[in-house]
Amino acid sequence: MVFAESALGSDTAIAHRSTCEPLPAPGSDTYLCEDSGTPVASMMSCLARKYFIVIVFCLCDVQGTDHYNTQMAIDSDGRLLAKYHKMHPYSPSERTKCIGDGHVTPVPDPAYFDTAFGVRFGMTLCYDIKFHTPAQALAVSNLGIHDIVFSTHWENEEGPPMGLSVALFQAWSRGTGANLLAANAGMGLMHTGSGIFSRGEALATSWRPGSPHDEVLLITRVPRLRATTPNYAGGRPGEPWGTEPLSRALPVWRLVEISPGQANTTETVQADPGFACTFTFSTKDGAGAANPELHVLVAVNGSWFGGGLPARACVMYRVPKSNLPGA
């Protein structure tokens, strides 16, 4: 069972530091049930043992003067299987220590765990999914990881980079050829959208933008994969956050019309002298082919929202002609 990122109050804001818990390192004898020093983690450990299920959830982990946005996995006997510190913070602060956020040495901190039912899960948190590390790197590694547990508090409206939750999660699963178990906050339009995906197929989803509190339990059968089947090509693995400085440069975009029957068409958008996005695509021809459609190609090597969110990304999305001025 996978919970959303903020489902249990995993707030790493300095003002809420008192809600953090000193979470221990995983080990063969790390049982948190009835541990008075970690009340929320203890409760979840006891529930996992009581109902004999594996539970994945998030808390704020405090270690000395630092605290971390943390995803945890508890085994069906209550044992702590794994603990993962978020690598790519959405809004880092000086004392919210996330690996690679510029406040600590950018060392990758991937984590995964094995279950009694024979599946090895990789772990990832919210904004992490926009980077090569950790989830994509785990899914295409030789570690035998074909399933990812993903806890998130996703931003839909005006969220970067123009990606609605369920659509983006499905695309990630298709791109890596992996299974993705995505649990979102379910709080109206801004934070709705959860799902279970296998190689891009949506096995179960929830999208309820009109519900202020969308508490849904998704249950489905997930195929066991023997290997991932990535369908993306080229590109370099994204470095952990903080290894290269990002400017406040705004995204560069280009509007292009894509017609039926185009074969291996290539478009390049240059963000700056050191970064460009190259898009190569083909479209169907003949019966059933769509009419020409407008798409926006975006390259960003600086920030979204005028410096509000550092980012490096290539984005392609369809624009209905009805959305254009004068349409």
Image (cartoon, helix red, strand yellow):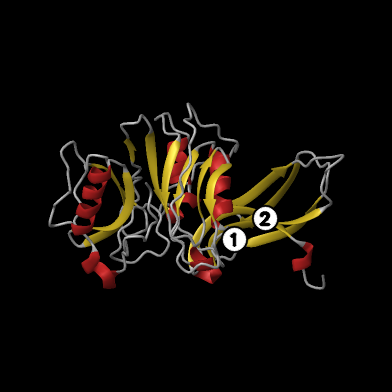
Identify the residue under disc 2: 317
Q: Is residue 275 left or right of residue 178?
A: right
**Residue farthest along the front direction in this orientation:** 51
| Front-lying residue, 255 or 113 | 113
Q: Is residue 167 left or right of residue 135?
A: right
Q: In this view of the protein, can residue 33 be seen by the observer? A: yes
- Give the class, few, some or many, for how many residues have Cα within 10 Å of label 1's Cα (few <14, many ≥20): some
Q: Mark 1 — residue?
A: 162
**Kind of residue at disc 1:** Met
Q: Position of residue 4 (x, y in %)?
A: 40, 56
Q: Residues within 10 Å of mark 2 (few under 14, many from 20)?
A: some
Which residue is located at x 51 percent, y 69 percent?
307
Q: Earlier in the sequence, mark 2 or mark 1?
A: 1
Q: Are marks 2 and 1 in contact (CB under 8 Å)?
A: yes
Cα distance between the residues tagged 2 and 1: 8 Å
Residue at 45% x, 45% y: name it: 219
